Amino acid sequence: MSSEQEQESIRCLVAKVGLDGHDRGAHVIARAFRDAGFEVIYSGLHKAPEEIVQAAVQEDVDVLGISILSGAHDTLIPKIMDGLEEYGAKEDTLVLAGGVIPEEDRAELKAEGVAAIFGPGTSVEETIEFVRENAPER
Amino acid sequence: MNADEELLEDLLAGEHRALARVISKIENRSSGYRDLVSELYAHTGDADVIGVTGSPGAGKSTLVDKLAETYRDRGETVGVIAIDPSSPFTGGAVLGDRIRMASTVGDMDVFVRSMSARGTLGGLSTATADAVKAMDAFGKDKIIIETVGAGQNEIDIVRTADTVAVLVPPGSGDEIQTLKAGILEIADVFVVNKADRDGADRTVQELRDMIQLDEGGGMAGGGGHHSQEVIDAHDDWDPEDDVDDADADAETWTTPIVETVATRGEGVDDLLEAFADHRQYLVDSGEHAEQVRGRYAEEIRTLLREDVHAMLEDRLAAAGGVDDLAEAVRQGETDPYSIADDVLAPVETCLEDLEIDDG
């Protein structure tokens, strides 16, 4: 009926993958996203790529933000991308990476399908703006 | 076949992504979601729906995790809907219950979905009920709804469940708390979680007193004498006795108290047994049919209320918005009651005309 009101909300999974135990940045982003009016699901520490994929698929998130400081991004992120593809979720999930990711590794991650990489010093406003502009239309 | 029909077919075929998508459509009130949910009804009715509620920090998520794990060990599939509050200011939310669902990660047959309140006026309970339908139609054997028990909204949500477990942490106040109306009244099973902590015995005792008081008041009908024994014997609570007893006993349900230590999985089997007993009781007593009827009645009411509300919002917007009216009240020119009368007068006239036409 005409008076139905759509109530869309941007849903984000903020994920910590692998063995690094530093989640201050993930907490800051989760809170900033919340305050921007997004729905944020936080994965918790030490998650395996398949756990992140499971959460992203079940929660049907628009945005997957992966925070990684351990240097294992070039093995872990491709595994996540493959998992998303397996469930047909790769195309319409905006994948972001944040944390310590050297310049020389970035091209490869982007080739894997990561939309943007936010290194140290990125303002949260910039990240939120990017999500607002690029969250997939479904 | 259009996109929604395809989505429905994929959901019925057991594709997880389709289930996830359907729940998103329900949450978003996307165009066409109503037709989709209408279609779901034909495929529902097989799942047991269990509500788990209690104050923040009572250990709900940890317990739900263990429940899901145990059901999976028994070969049953599980859906979990975890509800968290959202900010009244920005609408944003951090949905953090999933983080404690650690025992079942990597097992897609435990489907965990986090939800937050988006709309108003029972919107969350409608969305939750519809999401339960989607999981039921998908083929989940057990569906667990987890929500913080903080107010009326939560009570509406857990009413979506066949069986409601209320978690009561040890030391949660003096006995007068158990006399207050609200969350404790909706329990089919009490769970004293963190039963290894100080004060657990006292909390069990207070709950037991409360249940006895209820029975003594004759509120629960004819089975009071028997219920007393059941309460006294609750430590070795044996459902078989009860089921085998006279017919009168099958018609009342005495809320059992189960002690658990969710972090270690203690008491989880007892709790599942209590759920199964309650289920059996619902079926035997015929209360289940009544419960389901009541639930559908509530769904119809909520839908109508939401629709009327949306129509009124449209009218208000067309009339230039509520702000001018509110300002007029602030200036002392009119009052909310007069405005409501004015706005609704044409609706009333319309309805009266309709009735005359019908006659």
Image (spheres, rainbow, N blue to C red):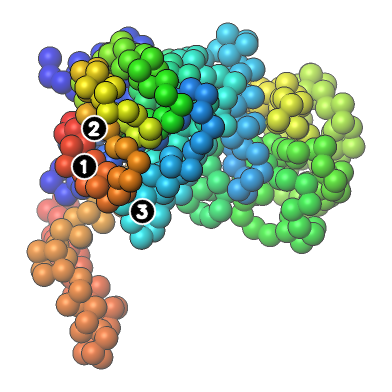
Q: Quadrant of residue B322?
A: bottom left
What is the crowding at mark 2: few (fewer than 14 residues within 10 Å), some, or many (at least 20)? some
Disc 1 to disc 2, C-alpha distance: 9 Å
Residue A116 tag number: 2
Residue in the foreground of this view, choosing between B249 and A100: A100
The N terminus of chain B is located in which quarter? top left
Q: Chain of mark 1?
A: A
Q: Earlier in the sequence, mark 3 or mark 2?
A: 3
Q: Is residue B305 above or below residue B321?
A: above
| SS of the residue under disc 2 | strand
- Relative horizontal placement of residue B53, taking residue B168 as reference (left or right): left
Marks 3 and 2, Cα distance to the nearest angstrom?
21 Å
Q: Which mark is residue A35?
A: 3
Secondary-structure class at tag 3: helix
Q: Amino acid at mark 1?
A: Phe
Mark 1 vs mark 3: same chain?
A: yes
Q: Nearer the viewer, mark 1 or mark 3?
A: 1
Kindly report which numbered mark, 1 or 2, lies closer to the viewer in this rendering: 2
Of marks 1 and 2, which one's residue comes earlier in the chain? 2
Q: Which residue is mark 1?
A: A130
Q: Chain of mark 3?
A: A
In screen coordinates, is B152 left or right of A122?
right
Earlier in the chain: of badge 1 and badge 3, it is: 3
Residue B31 position, x and y percent, is: 17, 36
Query: Disc 2 residue type?
Result: Ala
What is the chain letter for disc 2? Answer: A
Q: Position of residue B151 (x, y in %)?
A: 53, 55
What's the residue type where badge 3 is placed? Answer: Asp
| CA–CA distance in space, label 1 to label 3 | 15 Å
Residue drawn where x is 28% and y is 13% of the image: A85
